[in-house]
Image: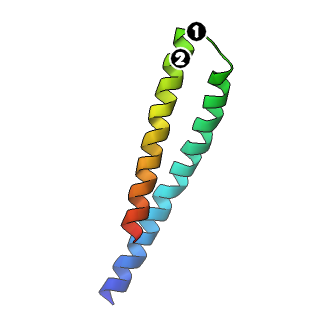
C-alpha cells in the first residue's frame, strides 16, 4: 500500500544520499592524511576545513540513519 511505497521511497533516497556521503568521507580521510604531513599556517587552515567537512558528513549520515528508523 501507500505506507510501503513511502518506506521504499525513503530507503531509496537514503541509499542515494549515503553513497556520495561515503565517497566524501573516504576522500576527506585521504586529504586529512596528506595535510597531516605538511606544516605551516596554510596547512593548519586546510586541516581545519577538512575537519569541519568531516563533522558535517557525520551529521548528515546521522540524519539519514534517523530518517530510516
Quadrant in the rendering for residue 67: bottom left
Task: Answer above or below: position of 33 versus 59.
Answer: above
Number of the label disc, if any, that sits on residue 51:
none
Q: Residues within 10 Å of mark 2 (few under 14, many from 20)?
A: some
Instruction: Provide residue 39's location: percent of width, then percent of height.
Output: 62, 12
Residue sticking out furthest to the top: 40
Do the numbered discs 2 and 1 sit on residues whose CB atoms are within 8 Å?
A: yes
Report the side of 28 relative to 61 (left or right). Answer: right
Q: Residue at x 46, y 69 (%)?
A: 12
Instruction: Provide residue 49's location: percent of width, then percent of height.
Output: 47, 27
Q: Quadrant of the C terminus?
A: bottom left
Instruction: Provide residue 66's location: percent of width, then percent of height.
Output: 38, 64
Report the side of 33 relative to 66 (left or right). Answer: right
The CA distance from mark 2 to mark 1 is 6 Å
Task: Answer above or below: position of 48 versus 62.
Answer: above
Q: Quadrant of the N terminus?
A: bottom left
Report the side of 40 relative to 16 (left or right). Answer: right
In the foreground, 44 or 19 = 44
Q: Residue at x 61, y 30 (%)?
A: 32
Which residue lies under the disc numbered 1? 40
In the foreground, 7 or 61 = 61
Q: Residue at x 51, y 30 (%)?
A: 50
Instruction: Provide residue 42's location: percent of width, then percent of height.
Output: 53, 12
Residue sticking out furthest to the left: 2
Number of the label disc, if any, that sits on residue 44:
2
Task: Answer above or below: position of 55 versus 10.
Answer: above
In the foreground, 18 or 38 = 38
SS type, badge 2: helix
Amino acid at each position: 500500500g501507500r505506507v510501503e511505497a513511502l518506506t521504499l521511497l525513503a530507503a531509496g533516497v537514503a541509499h542515494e544520499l549515503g553513497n556520495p556521503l561515503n565517497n566524501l568521507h573516504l576522500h576527506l580521510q585521504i586529504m586529512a592524511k596528506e595535510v597531516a604531513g605538511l606544516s605551516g599556517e596554510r596547512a593548519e587552515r586546510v586541516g581545519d576545513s577538512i575537519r569541519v567537512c568531516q563533522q558535517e558528513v557525520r551529521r548528515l549520515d546521522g540524519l539519514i540513519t534517523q530518517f530510516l528508523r
